[in-house]
Amino acid sequence: MDYPNGQEPGAPIRSGIPEHGRIPKYYAAKVRIEALLAELGEGEALPTERDLALRFEVSRETLRLALRELHLEGRLRRLGRGTVVAGPKLEQPLSLASYTEGVRKQGRRPGRHLVGLDRFPAPTKLAGELSLQVGDPVWHLERVLLADEERVGLESTYVSVARVPRLDTEFAPDSSFYAYLHEHLGIGFGTADERLETVLATPREALLIGTPGALPMLLIHRLSRDTRGVPLERVRSLYRGDRFSFTTHLGG
């Protein structure tokens, strides 16, 4: 099918070629590597840097620039000491659906690894967001997010102890928090406010998620309310920019 200006919808304008028509060497190498990735398929090992540099007749430094972009875009991923072709990004809806639901819809197996569950007095800002008194006890639940055992994000949930008093004894940390609220406490979600931004992970976050510190991350702040409109949770979710994209439906 022919598209206007030869551009497939969603592709970079003119496929990344500057108006003056001079293509940087690293970008030309990147385009050729992308064609190679299509031939190899998901999970296949990429040839060594030395082999690729010889094949495309570029310097190792130029080749590394091309590979770095492909890593940042999520087209490649590390596996042991090598590099393999990555699968498509996970699409997470910007909705009240849980992380578990979003991952399962794409045929992946969701999971979580507990980092910590702590109880502390609510500071002023958090107390105001959750409609609590300053000093009221709150839970902080921190977990690494998994998709088919691959670490893809880090989630921090803050919720009042009074609303969820037995979180430390009843809740299975590797399961869905939303399902627990609904099935054990009869709490349903009504509305939520979300804010999305791009950030770099802190050294601690990069270590927990298993990513380089320079990898762009997608950060979502969410304040959820129950069906009565009462604030329920404050969530900070950090997702790997190379493994996630977000979707939403807009209506007129």
Image (spheres, rainbow, N blue to C red):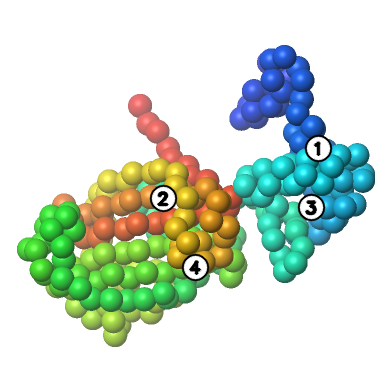
Residue sitting at 69 percent across and 27 percent down? Answer: 16
Q: CA distance from mark 2 to mark 3?
A: 30 Å
Q: CA distance from mark 4 to mark 3?
A: 29 Å
- Compare marks 4 and 3 and give the one earlier in the sequence: 3
Q: CA distance from mark 3 to mark 1?
A: 18 Å
In the image shown, does 87 or 100 lie closer to the viewer? 87
Q: CA distance from mark 1 to mark 2?
A: 31 Å
Instruction: Name the residue beneath numbered marker 1.
Output: 29
Q: Quadrant of residue 227?
A: bottom left
Look at discs 4 and 3 and give the one toward the viewer.
4
Q: Residue 166, position in %: x, y?
A: 23, 81
Instruction: Name the residue beneath numbered marker 4.
Output: 208
Residue 219 is tagged as 2
- Compare marks 1 and 4 and give the one earlier in the sequence: 1
Which image quarter holds the C terminus?
top left
Q: CA distance from mark 2 to mark 4?
A: 15 Å
**Position above or below: 177 against 74:** below
- Compare marks 3 and 1 and give the one earlier in the sequence: 1
Q: Residue 40, position in %: x, y?
A: 83, 52
Amino acid type at circle 4 is: Leu
Amino acid type at circle 3 is: Gly
Helix, strand or loop under label 4? helix
Amino acid type at circle 2 is: Leu
**Position above or below: 65 against 229:** above
Look at discs 2 and 3 and give the one toward the viewer.
2
Amino acid type at circle 1 is: Ala
Residue sitting at 39 percent across and 57 percent down? Answer: 237
**Position above or below: 5 against 104:** above
Instruction: Name the residue beneath numbered marker 3.
Output: 41
